[in-house]
Structure formats: C-alpha cells, structure tokens
Amino acid sequence: TKWEWGVSGTVDGIALNNPPGNPGGSGAGGVKITPRDLARFGLLMLNRGNWNGKQLLSASFVDEATSNQVPVGGGYRNRDFRGRYGYYWWVNGLMIDGKRPWPNAPAKTYMVNGAGANFCVVVPEWNLVIVRMGSPWRLGRFPDSLWDGFFARLAAGITTPRESQVRRADNA
C-alpha cells in the first residue's frame, strides 16, 4: 500500500527500476516498503505467488527465485554467492563445501535483505515469515553464524514443548 521503487533511467520510454541492493542512481536504491507490506510480500512468496486464491506470480517462478541460481563452480572476488543465491533471495542451498549457510534452518529457507539490516525471512517448512526493519546492525549485515544460532533456537521452540504447554496438557 505504501512503497517506492526508485527509477534509474529509461529505455525506449520504459522506466527502469533500480535493482535491489544498488544504492546508486536516482531513487537511491531498491524497494522502499513498510514492515507490514514487506511481511505481505513474504506471505505472497510463502504461498508460492498465491494471494487469497488468486495466483499473482507463477508458482514455478517463486520456486526458481527462491532456489539457488549460482553454480558452485567458478570463483568470486567479493561475497561468495555460490550455492546460496536465487533471484534476489538468499537461499539455504548447498555451498561449495557441501554445507548449508544455516544448517539449523530447514533446507527451503530463504530471505531477502536490504539497507539498514532490514530483512524478510521465509521458512516454508515452518509456515513462517519474519520481518525486521530498523537501524543498521553494528556489523553491517547479520553473519551466517548469527542466523544459524537464531534458527537453532527457533527450531528448539517449535519442536520442544515449553514447560507451560506440558503443564496445560497434563491439566486438560
């Protein structure tokens, strides 16, 4: 409902939106969005492009966008995308060492992140969308080890009943 996507130029009269992650150009970067709308976008992706019974994106496109698209072979100078990047989505794919970036997260977990350490995490196996928006993280981005610790604690909470839940079940 409230979003902005900067335009970096035009070709044959067609506006070209700034690519996500590109801080340059007029419009200064990718999509600017509210937390609620980012959560809605995550929910659209979680539901494989379906919104209230209407298919807005093809399910096959969502599957492709949220699956690894970067071959494990080859070298990279900066950040290593091999085995872990789809179409603007970070994925929990198998990297060059045969491991996943977030071993404690389900295999189909994916996320998008932007300036200020804003992110949207989608975990299809847990039917879960998590959004964080706010001031920048002190390290510039959340390291994989921090994410994996988060997923481990989340998985423990999902698979291990809390003491209060056990007591409630015993008293039922």
Image: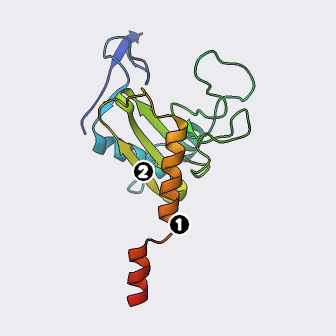
Secondary element at tag 2 = strand
Q: Is residue 2 left or right of residue 70?
A: left
**Residue denoted by label 1:** 159
Question: Which is more foreground, mark 2 or mark 1?
Answer: 1
13 is higher (above) or lower (below) than 118: above
Rendering coords of residue 163 (x, y %)? 42, 74
Asked whether residue 30 is in view, the answer is: yes
Q: What's under tag 2, amino acid-wise?
A: Val
Q: Is residue 67 above or below residue 79?
A: below
For the residues labelled 2 and 1, the Cα–Cα distance comes to 17 Å
Residue 49 image label: none
Residue type of the residue flagged with mark 1: Thr
**Relative side of 92 to 164, left or right:** right
Mark closer to the chain start, 2 or 1 = 2
Q: How is the image coloured?
A: rainbow
- Front-most of 57 and 120? 120
Please state the horizontal and vertical placement of residue 97, each as a whole percent of the image. Answer: 73, 35
Instruction: Mark yes or no: residue 172 visible.
Output: no
